[in-house]
Structures are given as C-alpha cells and as structure tokens.
Image (cartoon, rainbow, N blue to C red):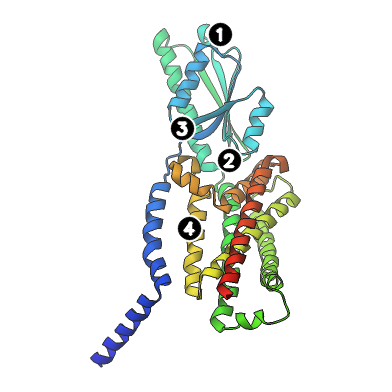
C-alpha cells in the first residue's frame, strides 16, 4: 500500500513538472498579482482631475487655488473660460471637479463679506465625489478660519462660503457607481471564458484538426466559432442592463443606441481576448488560469472600484492598455452623465484598435498552433 502511494505521488509530481506551462502559471501569477495589486490598491483618493474657472484672478483667489492644489487631492489639468466648458470637461470624463471663483471674490473678502465658491463634482464615481466633497468643505473652513484669525472678528460670518454641487448622482448612491462598471466586467468575463473554452474543448477532444479539413475556410471556421458567442454576449448585455435598470434602479440618462454601439465594440475586443487565450491554452485549466491574467487587472486597475488617479504611474500605464478601462468610462459616461458620441469617441477608437490588434495576434497564433 505504501509503495503504491509513493508511485502515485511520483507520477503526479512528474506529470506536474512536465507540464511546464501550467506550473509556470501557478507559480508566477500569484506573486505578480500580489506585487501589482499591492501597489495599485489605494483607498486614499488623490490627484483628482480638476479644472478651474477663475473670474477673479487676484492674490486672494490664487492663494485659495494654491491651497487646493497643494493639498494633494486635486490635480489641476487646465483652465476654462465658461460654465459650459467646465461642465463639458466633467461630462466627457476629463475632469471630476470644477472650481469656479466669482469675479468679486477678493472684494468680498476685503470688505468683510462672505465670498462664495462654486465647486462642481462628478458624482458618477461616488468614492471620488465623497472625498472631493469632504476636502472642499475642509479647505474652505480652514481658509475662513485663517481670515478670521487675521481680523480677530469673531462675530463675522464665514468669509469663504463653499457651495459644492454633486452632478449626475447627487445622492451618491453606491449602485449608480458600481453597477454600470460591473456590467462591463461581467460582459468581459463571460464572453472571454465562453470563447476560450469553445476552442480549447476542440483541442482536448482532438476534433479541431477534423474541422480544418472541411471545405470551410479558416476565416469561416473562426467566424463560425465566434459569432454565436457574439450573439450570446449581446443577449447577456441586454440582460444585465435590464437588471441594472429595474432591479438596482439605475436610470440610463443617455442614448441606448449609442450604448449598444460601444457595447458591440467591447464585445468584439473581449471575443478576441478569448480567442487569444485559446491559442495559448491546451486545456480548460490553463484557459481559466490565463483568463485570470486578463480578468484580475480588469477588475482592479480599470477604475471599476479603485480610482486610477491614485495609482503609481507604472500601474496607471498598465490600466491604459486594459479594454475594460475604456468601456467602463463609456458606461458611466452614457448611463450617468448623458455623454454623447463626441464626448466618448476616443474611448471607442481605443476599443476598436485593441480589438483589431488582439484579433490579428490571436489569428496568427491560431494558424501557428495548427501548423
């Protein structure tokens, strides 16, 4: 009995060592993921993209803006010349905060009156919005106390009256932030796994070569494999959007047709990623492990949960090559901010470019694997 047990142990160890691809994935992925995500995950929101509309331009307003900038929470990306331009920056997702200083800000401070400060905050990301709201109130209160300490007038009303306004999600509901992003993650996970398993099963059963000798071209074979899952992905997208709307009560502010167009672009990319996984994996276990390589970064580095602006530069750069990053921006832009095509066309271009690139690489590897 003991001798038989040793034989089985020897067989399994030998089999595992021979399967170097699976062994490499098992040993390498946990360490790489821990290092990457340990640096990337930071609940302290910093470097919030901010635009400034300063109608005063004098020393007092500049000093106030310096306090916002030096706090480390706001990253000034530019100045605007109108209220509409400031709002457009937020709708497009280029900025999450807009600070407007009235032309009489300095005059009111000097004459002992209360100077108002308007701050627009993008509520589509409730985590960032809550942090920005708290910091705006804290900075305005500190500035007021500094002014009062200089004048020694304890009866005076607060000199700086911040008027923050949360746009698109004024109640800061968590489902409004989480569920649209979850739609993109669910679409990617299901579509990738379905596509990769379909091809890998053919490999495991030894039927892929039989399909190749049929009159169907390789392109026709690939389309025949992918199109059914594209249809399933479309049905899945409609299903999760209906659940989002009627179960979680997240209203869709923008165009459904525009959302459908961007969703097709993302499905195209996700199908290509599944096909790429299938060209590398030789069995379903490897397909799952390789899919995790794509899925975990999509969950943690795309801005689905954690704000990307707080991540180190190298981790932020990795997030830039993840398709889910752009699709989640599209989802939140259309669903929450009523963004239009011109506001989001760059994200769509990135998705199409990534989809074509992945599909070309996967097709080349598929041919090489068959050869």
Check disc 2 and report the residue beneath it: 171
Check disc 1 and report the residue beneath it: 107
Q: Who comes first in sequence, dot 3 or dot 2?
A: 3
Q: Marks 3 and 2, how far apart in space?
A: 22 Å
Q: Secondary structure at mark 1?
A: helix
**Residue 187 showing in the rendered view:** no
Badge 3 density bin: few <14, some 14–19, many ≥20, Cα 10 Å: many
Badge 2 density bin: few <14, some 14–19, many ≥20, Cα 10 Å: few
Which disc is residue 319 wearing? none
Q: Marks 2 and 1, how far apart in space?
A: 34 Å
In this view, which residue lies farthest toward the front? 371
The mark lying in front, picked from 3 and 2, is 3
Check disc 4 and report the residue beneath it: 296
Q: Secondary structure at mark 4?
A: helix
Q: Residue at x 59, y 79 (%)?
A: 202
Which of the 4 image quarters holds residue 29?
bottom left
Is 132 left or right of 8, judged from the image as shown?
A: right
Check disc 3 and report the residue beneath it: 73
Please determine whether, in this image, residue 218 is positioned above or below residue 351.
below
Q: Who comes first in sequence, dot 4 or dot 3?
A: 3
Which of the 4 image quarters holds residue 56?
top right
Q: Position of residue 30 (x, y in %)?
A: 38, 61
Q: Position of residue 207 (x, y in %)?
A: 60, 83
Residues at marks 2 and 4 touching, judged by CB atoms closer than 8 Å: no
Q: Secondary structure at mark 3?
A: loop
Q: Marks 4 and 3, how far apart in space?
A: 27 Å
Q: Who comes first in sequence, dot 4 or dot 1?
A: 1
Q: Residue at x 56, y 75 (%)?
A: 200
Badge 1 density bin: few <14, some 14–19, many ≥20, Cα 10 Å: some
Badge 4 density bin: few <14, some 14–19, many ≥20, Cα 10 Å: some
């Amino acid at each position: 009995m003991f001798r038989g047990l040793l034989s089985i142990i020897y067989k399994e160890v030998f089999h595992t060592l021979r399967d170097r691809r699976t062994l490499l994935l098992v040993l390498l992925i946990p360490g790489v993921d821990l290092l990457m995500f340990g640096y990337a995950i930071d609940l302290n929101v910093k470097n919030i993209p901010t635009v400034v509309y300063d109608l005063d331009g004098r020393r007092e307003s500049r000093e106030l803006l310096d306090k916002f900038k030096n706090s480390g929470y706001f990253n000034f990306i530019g100045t605007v010349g109108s209220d509409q331009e400031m709002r457009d920056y937020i709708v497009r997702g280029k900025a999450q905060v807009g600070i407007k200083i009235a032309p009489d800000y300095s005059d009111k401070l000097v004459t002992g009156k209360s100077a108002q400060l308007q701050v627009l905050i993008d509520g589509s990301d409730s985590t960032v919005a809550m942090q920005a709201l708290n910091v705006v109130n804290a900075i305005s209160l500190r500035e007021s106390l500094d002014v009062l300490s200089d004048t020694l007038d304890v009866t005076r009303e607060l000199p700086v009256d911040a008027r923050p306004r949360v746009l698109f999600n004024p109640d800061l509901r968590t489902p409004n932030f989480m569920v649209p992003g979850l739609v993109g993650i669910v679409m990617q996970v299901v579509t990738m796994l379905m596509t990769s398993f379909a091809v890998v099963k053919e490999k495991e059963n030894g039927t892929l070569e039989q399909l190749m000798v049929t009159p169907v071209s390789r392109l026709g074979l690939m389309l025949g494999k992918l199109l059914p899952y594209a249809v399933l992905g479309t049905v899945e997208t409609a299903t999760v959007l209906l659940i989002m709307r009627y179960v979680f009560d997240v209203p869709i502010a923008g165009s459904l047709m525009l959302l459908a167009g961007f969703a097709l672009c993302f499905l195209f990319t996700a199908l290509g990623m599944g096909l790429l996984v299938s060209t590398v994996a030789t069995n379903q276990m490897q397909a799952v492990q390789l899919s995790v390589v794509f899925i975990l970064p999509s969950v943690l580095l795309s801005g689905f949960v954690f704000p990307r602006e707080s991540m180190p530069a190298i981790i932020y750069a990795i997030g830039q090559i993840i398709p889910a990053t752009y699709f989640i921006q599209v989802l939140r832009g259309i669903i929450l901010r009523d963004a239009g095509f011109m506001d989001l066309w760059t994200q769509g271009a990135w998705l199409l470019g990534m989809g074509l690139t992945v599909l070309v690489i996967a097709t080349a590897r598929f041919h090489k694997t068959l050869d």
